[in-house]
Structure formats: structure tokens, C-alpha cells
Image (cartoon, rainbow, N blue to C red):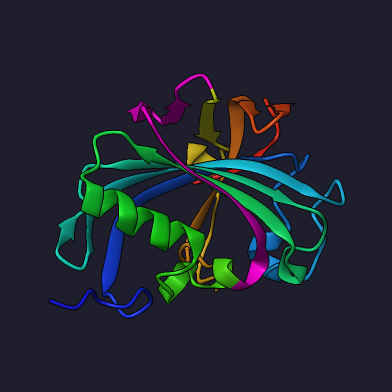
Amino acid sequence: MALDEVGTVPWTIKGELILNCNCTVFCPCVVSLGKHPPTEGHCQAWSGIRIDEGQYGDADLSGLNVGLFLEIPGNMGRGNWKAAAFIDDRASEEAYAGLVNIFSGAARGSTGLFGMLVGEFLGAEREQVVFETEGNERRLMVGKKIQGAVVPVEGKDGKDIVVTNTEYWMGPDITVAQATKGRVRAFGRVWDFEGRSAEI
């Protein structure tokens, strides 16, 4: 039996993504789609994905979590990103391979632009990836490498502030958030973005 060529395998993920970066206020990339530089001129970020339902070909991705590490030297749209993925250690071999293909951009689809924008994929590692929600706080723990937590920024009448109907790669509706914890110890980087921009 011939293996399906990467990039032709159908895949789908439904769930929730959280992200915390070094921007001091809400990330300009969401609305400008990478045309405007990050507030600090460069982007350093961690992200967590909770997969509620997902498939990569015949592999079931449901119930798995993924952590991402991103470093972008300037405008998001200009590329030359460094990226890495931390894949849930509970994933089967097939699910692991599928998630690496998805988050490296090789699988095409909505993350396919990673294939163009990531200049250096630092690799994928199996790791204990925990994604928890308590009240309105979302927490991501990737071994000792990422310890993060984000909460929505409160708007009028205590409701979340949501930027809707965007063309953002991860989904049209982005909840404006802030990190209550944002520590990264990976790939020789030591970051702490507590209080900085976050997204849900």
C-alpha cells in the first residue's frame, strides 16, 4: 500500500488556541495580517492548542494537546520565522506524525503558510502537554519548558472583548486576552511575558 503524500492527506482540527507574545498591547498582526510589525519590532511567542475533535487521515487527534514556540524577527508576513512544536506524549505514532506535518506547514491547509514563513523549523518533541481551563483562565504546561496562563480582557458589562470576522490564520474570531503567566525555557531562550498580549 502506497503512503499518502504529505500535503494531500485531509485533516481537520476543532478546539481552542491560546497564545502569549512579547507585544505590550494586543497583537497588531491579528488585524494587519502581518503587515504591521509587532509592538516591540520582533515577535517571541508561545502557544497552546487543545484539540477537541481532530483527524489526520485515519489518525484520531481528538483529546490531544500541542504546544508551539515561535520567534519572528520582524513583520510576520516577511517570514524567516523560527518555530518548534511540542506534541502530546499520549499521541499515537500516526497522530504524532500528523501533528508534526500540520504544525510544520507540510500538511497544507490553514497552517500551510507555516511552510512558507518558517525559515527554520527547530523540530518537534514529545512532551507532557497539559491544557486546562479554570473559570475564564486557560493554562498551558509543557513539561518544564512552557508555563503559561491567559485570561480574557474584560470589556463593557464584564463581557470579553472579541475581534470578529478576521482573516487570521487560526480562526475569524479572536478574544483579546492578557497573560497571567508566560514563562518559556526552551531552545536556549528564557522568556517571561506575564502581563503582555495574549489571544484566545
Instruction: Determine the residue positioned at 14% across, 64% down.
Output: 58
The overriding secondary structure of the stretch rendered in magenta is strand
- Does residue 54 lie above or below 191 as drawn? below
Across and down, in percent, residue 165 comes to 50, 71
Using residue 155 as the reference point, say whether residue 24 is left or right of it. right
Q: Quadrant of the N terminus?
A: bottom left
Most extreme residue toward the right is: 41
Q: Nearer the viewer, residue 113 or 93?
A: 93
Taking depth in this image into account, of 134 and 62 the one nearest to the observer is: 62
Specify the quadrant of the image occupied by residue 90: top left
Q: Is residue 125 above or below residue 17?
A: above
Whether residue 155 is visible here, answered yes or no, is: no
* Residue found farthest to the front: 1
Name the side, left or right, on which 127 lies relative to 64: right
Count up the numbered dots: 0
Q: Is residue 199 left or right of residue 5?
A: right
Q: Mark yes or no: residue 14 visible.
A: yes
The x and y percentages for residue 146 are 54, 27
Question: In the image, what residue occupies the spot 41% across and 31% down?
Answer: 136
Q: Residue at x 52, y 67 (%)?
A: 169
Q: In this orientation, which residue lies closer to the viewer: 71 or 52?
A: 71
Which span is picked out in magenta? 116-144
